[in-house]
Image (spheres, rainbow, N blue to C red):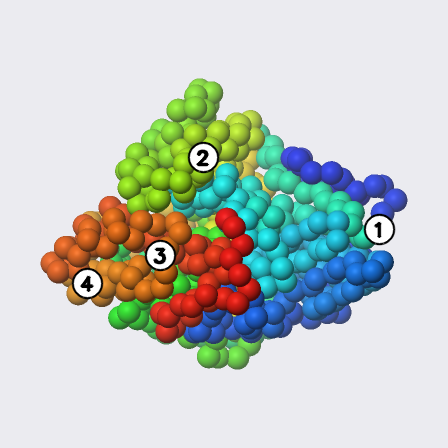
């Protein structure tokens, strides 16, 4: 069975397709979702451990093994996560989701057309396992060998490309995936969409975007549940909020989290102004005084697939304390409307075929200097710059033909692999979250626009101000000062937390403790942000990755470590 294609779209695929005679039990995904219901996953707890004997096996998974010629199934035989919308009687659907069903004949897995719902698998001739949680797959016995190519790119860009994860034999599902594993045989299809090239005047494009986005909200706004809307100071969530209001769907309240220093903290004030102008209650939530615990717990929950997102945990906990919540997220709104285009003239480099130079813009010199200093020489050699450059270059080539190649590269890699981890990772079990910018009609239209139309990064601003003139005078956060905030007490607390993580337990595998500790002492004393020349979140990430690979138990709450009785697999 070939991968589904939207009108005007074709799909790239680097994996084998299904035979024509095979019939999927997940083909009618809307019926499957209705029959199975939302998969139980539980809300993210405050205490997490990577120990294979811990609670990770209480999370959703299915693990199928061949034992003495017999198929043994462990875990949930049927699971659905996310949401699906039936758009037409012909079976056309939309939504963000992951699903599987399993029996003694094997396992079938399916996801949404973008591959945005987090779902990971490992496979060999004797066993197959799938889960939304990377650490659950490790608890099932997935090997802990490192994916050196994937990590080489991640350490320099902050995101994994393609289907890479930190572990060589654990993979993310590709977009619009259809997967079947049966008695040692794996068949899988999927791949990114290839957009059509559209010729349209800019004014007409803005009008079409306004209409299509209104349709996307209309398709989703009638779902049951208490509507709580995360609202930032930016464009994406404001467009959602104002269109909900225009259609008569008034949120119970909007919610905004303060930002960690040194990020400018404009969001709360601007979101409050927007909500007040609309007459909607607005709630702000503060970040914890000691953020290290949240950082460590978040890394484990999201499977070490990002170093971002700890700032969203207070929002998640607030939402999780209330029943039957539905929410909206602006995933994709930035990159699909032109963000990332002006950086280092990337569009010009793409269009000029200067991909070697383009790859270099994603591999920053300052990050390379930091990595060379903080990684042990053996680790730096294995995860080297050349490996990252070659992998990144190969991925960039896959997007060179797209109407907006920069947006395509960033969406199918950074956006797809990082941003949904908030709504469908951190918020899993807390709320049903809709993503209207990923409505198939909105997405297909925006990806068809030429990059040159979006390059000034005003396309979305102009659309919002044209559609909702009453709110046009309220600025967006990116229009205000982006000067970094200095908070000496926060810096001291944060550095102290990093130093504690470095100091306890056995010598870390992937960072040079003896190099970093003395260089963090000065920022600890004077409260300056000089420690940021060594990426602080990456230090914590590498500490945890090393301990997981070594089989060390690590309790994010207590900050204590000891050696697991399961031994120490080699990286």
Q: Is residue 451 above or below residue 272?
A: above
Residue at the limit of the structure toward the right, as seen here: 21
Residue 23: image tag: 1
Measuring from the top left, give residue 228's x and y in whole percent: 46, 71
Distance, label 2 to label 1, CA atoms, is 39 Å
Q: Nearer the viewer, residue 270 or 320?
A: 320
Name the mark on residue 492. Answer: 4
The residue under the point 17% across, 57% down is 521
* Label 1 – label 3 distance at C-alpha: 52 Å
The answer to which of marks 2 and 4 sits earlier in the sequence is 2
Q: Which residue is mark 3?
A: 507
Question: Who is closer to the viewer here, 232 or 176?
Answer: 176
Classify residue 460 by image quadrant.
Answer: top left
Q: Is residue 66 visible?
A: yes
- Assess disc 4: are there few (<14), some (14-19) or many (≥20) residues with their C-alpha within 10 Å of its C-alpha: many
The answer to the question of whether label 1 and label 3 lie on touching residues, with beta carbons closer than 8 A, is no
- Cα separation, mark 2 vs mark 4, equals 33 Å
Q: Position of residue 105 (x, y in %)?
A: 84, 58
Give left or right: position of 20 versus 555. Answer: right
């Amino acid at each position: 069975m070939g991968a589904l294609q939207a009108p005007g779209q074709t799909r790239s695929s680097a994996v084998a397709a299904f035979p024509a005679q095979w019939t999927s039990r997940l083909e009618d995904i809307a019926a499957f979702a209705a029959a199975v219901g939302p998969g139980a996953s539980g809300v993210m707890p405050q205490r997490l451990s990577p120990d294979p004997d811990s609670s990770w096996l209480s999370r959703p998974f299915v693990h199928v093994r061949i034992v003495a010629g017999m198929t043994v199934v462990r875990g949930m035989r049927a699971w659905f996560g996310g949401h699906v919308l039936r758009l037409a009687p012909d079976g056309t659907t939309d939504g963000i989701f992951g699903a599987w069903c399993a029996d003694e004949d094997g396992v079938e897995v399916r996801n949404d057309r973008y591959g945005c719902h987090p779902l990971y698998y490992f496979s060999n001739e004797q066993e197959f396992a799938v889960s939304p949680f990377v650490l659950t797959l490790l608890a099932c016995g997935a090997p802990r060998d490192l994916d050196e190519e994937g990590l080489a790119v991640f350490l320099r860009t902050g995101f994994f490309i393609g289907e890479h994860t930190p572990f060589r034999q654990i993979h993310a599902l590709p977009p619009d995936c259809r997967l079947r594993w049966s008695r040692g045989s794996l068949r899988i299809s999927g791949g990114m969409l290839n957009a059509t090239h559209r010729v349209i005047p800019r004014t007409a494009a803005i009008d079409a975007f306004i209409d299509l986005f209104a349709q996307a909200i209309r398709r989703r706004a009638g779902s049951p549940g208490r509507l709580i809307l995360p609202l930032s100071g930016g464009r994406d969530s404001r467009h959602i909020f104002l269109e909900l209001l225009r259609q008569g769907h008034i949120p119970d309240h909007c919610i905004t989290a303060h930002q960690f220093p040194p990020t400018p903290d404009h969001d709360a004030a601007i979101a409050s102004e927007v909500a007040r102008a609309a007459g909607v209650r607005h709630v702000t939530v503060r970040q914890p005084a000691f953020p290290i615990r949240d950082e460590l717990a978040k890394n484990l929950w999201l499977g070490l697939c990002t170093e971002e997102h700890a700032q969203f945990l207070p929002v998640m906990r607030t939402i999780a304390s209330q029943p039957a919540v539905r929410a909206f997220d602006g995933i994709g709104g930035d990159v699909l409307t032109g963000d990332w285009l002006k950086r280092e003239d990337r569009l010009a480099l793409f269009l000029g075929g200067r991909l070697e130079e383009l790859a270099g813009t994603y591999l920053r010199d300052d990050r390379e200097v930091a990595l060379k200093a903080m990684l042990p020489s053996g680790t730096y050699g294995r995860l080297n710059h050349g490996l990252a450059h070659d992998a990144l270059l190969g991925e960039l080539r896959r997007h060179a033909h797209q109407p907006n190649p920069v947006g395509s590269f960033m969406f199918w890699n950074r956006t797809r692999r990082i941003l949904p981890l908030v709504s469908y990772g951190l918020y899993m079990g807390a709320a049903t979250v809709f993503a209207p910018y990923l409505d198939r009609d909105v997405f297909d239209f925006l990806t068809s626009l030429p990059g040159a139309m979006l390059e000034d990064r005003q396309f979305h601003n102009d659309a919002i101000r044209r559609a909702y003139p009453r709110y046009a005078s309220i600025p967006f956060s990116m229009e205000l000062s982006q000067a970094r905030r200095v908070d000496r007490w926060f810096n001291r607390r944060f550095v102290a937390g990093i130093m504690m993580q470095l100091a306890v337990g056995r010598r870390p595998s992937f960072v040079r403790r003896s190099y970093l500790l003395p260089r963090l002492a000065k920022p600890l004393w004077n409260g300056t942000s000089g420690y940021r020349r060594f990426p602080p979140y990456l230090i914590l990430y590498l500490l945890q990755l090393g301990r997981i690979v070594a089989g060390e138990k690590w309790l994010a709450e207590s900050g204590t470590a000891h050696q697991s009785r399961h031994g120490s697999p080699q990286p």
